[in-house]
């Protein structure tokens, strides 16, 4: 609880925390919106393949043009302004940047950017959960060996869940489950970018504003983003994904402790220590009472009768037995909060959540019956959704990770809801990423 005072001390010494941002989309725009209001937080450079989009993002979040007109990173460093580039490599090589925020959303690019940043001695805040679930454990190991921090992005739900899990363990409670809320019904699973706006209340003006990517929103709708995020949480906390993927049980705030406990105790979990989603809709589409659509939660068990009695005395939400309780955070503000991760890395040398083991994976699963020769179109597309499963199962089945399922051709037919294997597709590029994934298997935890 001292980041602001630590930053103030750095700023008073004329040593602001200097940051490079890769990716000026929605998340990046939210980071930039707050950055100009944090004394001692200097965005030296912003890299994006589309400089026109980057300029539009900065203008949209009320940056004056002269603030991002520096011709070079050195000039930006000296004047407290910002340099824009379409070459992330230049940003990564600049010595004056201390922390790199990777916010492209592109999994393979994110991994390569993180590796380059680590090699250059920079801390990495990985907004790109797609990259983290693909290779976060090995990236974090390399960062530790290099003496830098590799961190999840605070404000995004995985980091908030890691914080709640840490709270449970630090308090001495028995961790039972962790998860988040989500607007989900079973039929959402087969949504496509062509149908996704049917599931939202956005106006046509909002959709056309430039912040709304149909594939990205479809990834949230069909459950893919949930699988990616929950697998990342499992890798960071040592928890488990359900053997056959997330169950999405409907649950409101008052139901969390009753639903998210083991079946042997009357709940819906296959065992203790599971990550899952509290769906905000019933299977028939009705909205769940007191749903936590934007929130994150943990359930935990009292270690003894005295603690159980304290749960009751202090109004904790519990199951009927009183032994199981839940704690939650109602909202997350995404990029508006990510400065916490940047400052934690730079000032405390501490991540706000980081992958430690290869414990879970998010694997490509067919949305329909497709023939040999068909092209998969990756996260949020028409062809596959992601299932979060234990890493041991993913390795045993040679499953195709969702992050490598974009623009790959099927060699043989697959059926709806079948996990696609690497043997089912033609692998023609990304071979460095496949090699990194193979190396990560030595961090496999069962």
Image (cartoon, rainbow, N blue to C red):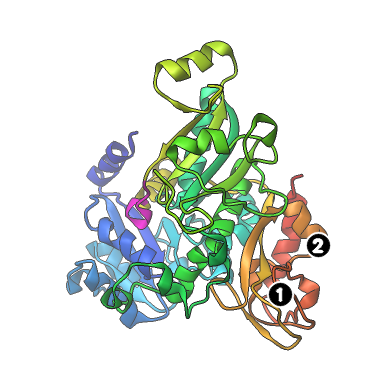
Q: Nearer the viewer, residue 398 or 38?
A: 398
Q: Nearer the viewer, mark 1 or mark 2?
A: 2
**Relative vertical location of residue 329 with respect to residue 158 in this rendering, above or below:** above
Which residue is located at x 60 percent, y 45 percent? Answer: 275
Which residue is located at x 73 percent, y 71 percent? Answer: 420
Q: Estimate the spatial distance between the alpha carbons at disc 1 and disc 2, rounded to whole Å.
A: 19 Å
**Relative vertical location of residue 51 with respect to residue 235 in this rendering, above or below:** below
- Give the quadrant of the N terminus: top left
Which residue is located at x 41 percent, y 55 percent? Answer: 98
Q: Is residue 179 visible in the rendered structure shown here? A: yes
Residue 427 image offset from top left, x and y in percent: 73, 79
Q: Which mark is residue 431?
A: 1
Say which quarter of the image contains residue 54. Answer: bottom left
| Number of other residues with Cα within 10 Å of mark 1, as a class: few under 14, some 14 to 19, many 20 or more | few
Residue 411 image offset from top left, x and y in percent: 78, 83
Q: Nearer the viewer, residue 53 or 178?
A: 178
Which residue is located at x 82 percent, y 58 percent? Answer: 396
> What segment is highlighted magenta in the picture?
331-337
Q: Which mark is residue 288?
A: none
Position of residue 413 in the picture relative to residue 100 (left or right): right
**In the rendered structure, does residue 336 fall within the stretch colored magenta?**
yes
Say which quarter of the image contains residue 386. Answer: bottom right
Q: Is residue 119 visible in the rendered structure shown here? A: no
Label 2: which secondary element: loop
**Extreme-bottom residue of the structure:** 373
Q: Which mark is residue 397?
A: 2
Residue 236 image offset from top left, x and y in percent: 59, 45
Labelled pair 1, 2 in contact (Cβ < 8 Å): no
Position of residue 330 in the picture relative to residue 261 (left or right): left
Label 1: which secondary element: helix
Residue 3 image offset from top left, x and y in percent: 33, 39
Position of residue 289 in the picture relative to residue 188 (left or right): left
């Amino acid at each position: 609880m001292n980041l602001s005072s630590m930053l103030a001390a750095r700023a008073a010494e004329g040593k602001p925390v200097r940051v490079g941002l890769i990716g000026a989309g929605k998340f990046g725009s939210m980071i930039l919106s707050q950055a100009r209001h944090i004394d001692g937080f200097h965005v030296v450079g912003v890299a994006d393949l589309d400089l026109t989009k980057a300029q539009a993002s900065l203008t949209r979040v009320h940056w004056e043009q002269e603030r991002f007109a520096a011709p070079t990173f050195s000039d930006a460093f000296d004047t407290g302004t910002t340099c824009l580039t379409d070459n992330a490599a230049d940003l990564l090589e600049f010595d004056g940047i201390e922390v790199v925020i990777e916010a492209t959303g592109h999994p393979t690019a994110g991994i390569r950017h993180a590796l380059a940043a680590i090699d250059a001695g920079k801390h990495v805040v990985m907004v790109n959960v797609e990259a983290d679930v693909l290779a976060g454990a090995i990236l974090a190991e390399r960062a530790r060996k290099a003496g830098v921090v590799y961190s999840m992005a605070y404000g995004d739900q995985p980091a908030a869940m890691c914080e709640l899990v840490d709270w449970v363990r630090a308090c001495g409670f028995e961790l039972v489950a962790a998860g988040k809320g989500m607007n989900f019904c079973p039929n959402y699973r087969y949504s496509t970018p062509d149908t996704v706006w049917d599931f939202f209340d956005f106006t046509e003006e909002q959709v056309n504003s430039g912040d709304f990517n149909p594939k990205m929103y479809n990834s949230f709708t069909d459950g893919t983003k949930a699988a990616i995020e929950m697998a990342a949480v499992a890798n960071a906390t040592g928890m488990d994904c359900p053997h056959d993927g997330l169950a999405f049980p409907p649950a409101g705030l008052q139901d969390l402790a009753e639903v998210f406990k083991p079946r042997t105790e009357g709940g819906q979990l296959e065992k203790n220590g599971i990550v899952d989603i509290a769906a905000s809709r019933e299977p028939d589409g009705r909205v769940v009472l007191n749903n936590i659509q934007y929130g994150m939660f943990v359930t935990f068990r009292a270690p003894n009768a005295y603690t159980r009695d304290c749960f009751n005395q202090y109004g904790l939400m519990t199951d009927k037995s009183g032994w199981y309780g839940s704690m939650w955070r109602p909202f997350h503000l995404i990029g508006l909060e990510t400065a916490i991760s940047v400052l934690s890395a730079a000032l405390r040398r501490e991540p706000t959540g980081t992958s430690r083991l290869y414990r879970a994976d998010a694997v490509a699963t067919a949305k329909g019956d497709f023939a040999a020769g068909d092209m998969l179109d990756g996260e949020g597309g028409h062809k596959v959704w992601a299932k979060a499963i234990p890493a041991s199962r993913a390795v045993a089945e040679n499953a195709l990770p969702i992050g490598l399922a974009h623009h790959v051709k099927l060699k043989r037919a697959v059926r709806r809801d079948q996990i696609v294997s690497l043997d089912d597709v033609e692998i023609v590029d990304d071979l460095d990423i496949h090699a990194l994934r193979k190396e990560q298997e030595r961090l496999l935890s069962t």
